[in-house]
Amino acid sequence: MIDSMSSADVANAERFERIGIAADAGSAARTREEFARWLHEFFDLDPIRTSDVVLAINEALANAAEFAYLLADRPGTKDLQARYDTGGARLTVVVSDNGLWRIPGRGADTRARGRGIPLMRALSDRTTIETLSGGTQVRLEWRGVPRP
């Protein structure tokens, strides 16, 4: 079993990190809640924009939990790293895993699926997804993120 306590449990005004999170739904939910508290503590976002940011992050975490290790022999991990650029008032969040990109038609029923990536794109100012043999990295960016 993977220990859900991360090796990097950092949160300050410029960064939030959870490294080595167990790739499961429970860990995704806990990380989402911790990230939402960090947003509330260090940023001056209205409730709608806060919800948008948290929902986009949740989609990235949930995708890694559900799909990255679907064909793996054992459970895997995911990482969340958020950085705030004070000069550009930009928040960048990267969710990464060491699993495989979801293969269409394999695993979960895909007829009712496929809304997470369009949702992340709609909720962020920029979304990039990099898929490599060693894992997937989802990068989400928001501009004009105010601090109190």
Image (cartoon, rainbow, N blue to C red):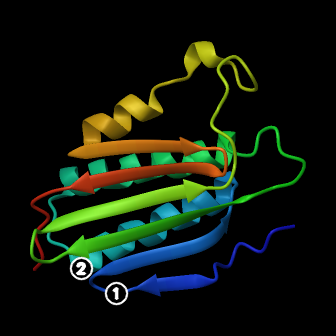
Q: Secondary structure at mark 1?
A: loop
Looking at the rendering, which quadrant does residue 66 occupy?
Answer: top right
Label placed on residue 12: 1
Front: mark 1 or 2: 1
* Residue drawn at the location 48% of the way across and 61% of the way down: 32
Q: Is residue 94 left or right of residue 100?
A: left
Number of marks present in the image shown: 2
- Callout 1, which amino acid? Asn
Residue 134 picture location, percent across and down: 66, 51
* Residue in the foreground of this view, choosing between 14 and 5: 14
Which disc, if any, is residue 92?
none
Q: Residue 29: x and y, percent?
A: 56, 58
Residue 139 shown left or right of residue 77 in the figure: left
Q: For mark 2, what is the residue?
A: 42
Asked if residue 93 is positioned above or below residue 111 in the image, the reply reads: below
In the rendered image, the quadrant that contains the C terminus is: bottom left
Q: Residue furthest toward the top?
A: 111
Q: Is residue 146 left or right of residue 85?
A: left
Residue 59 sits above or below residue 122 on the image = below
- Given the image, on which type of amino acid does mark 2 rest? Phe
In the rendered view, would you say 25 is above or below 33? above
Residue 122 pos. (x, y %)? 27, 35
Give the Cα distance between marks 1 and 2. 8 Å
- Tag 1 and tag 2, C-beta contact below 8 Å: yes
Q: Secondary structure at mark 2?
A: helix
Visible residue check, residue 124? no
Image quadrant in which you'd find residue 120: top left
The answer to whether residue 50 is visible is yes
Q: Earlier in the sequence, mark 1 or mark 2?
A: 1
Horizontal and vertical percent for residue 53?
A: 30, 53
x 20%, y 50%: residue: 48
Left or right side of 135 for 59: left
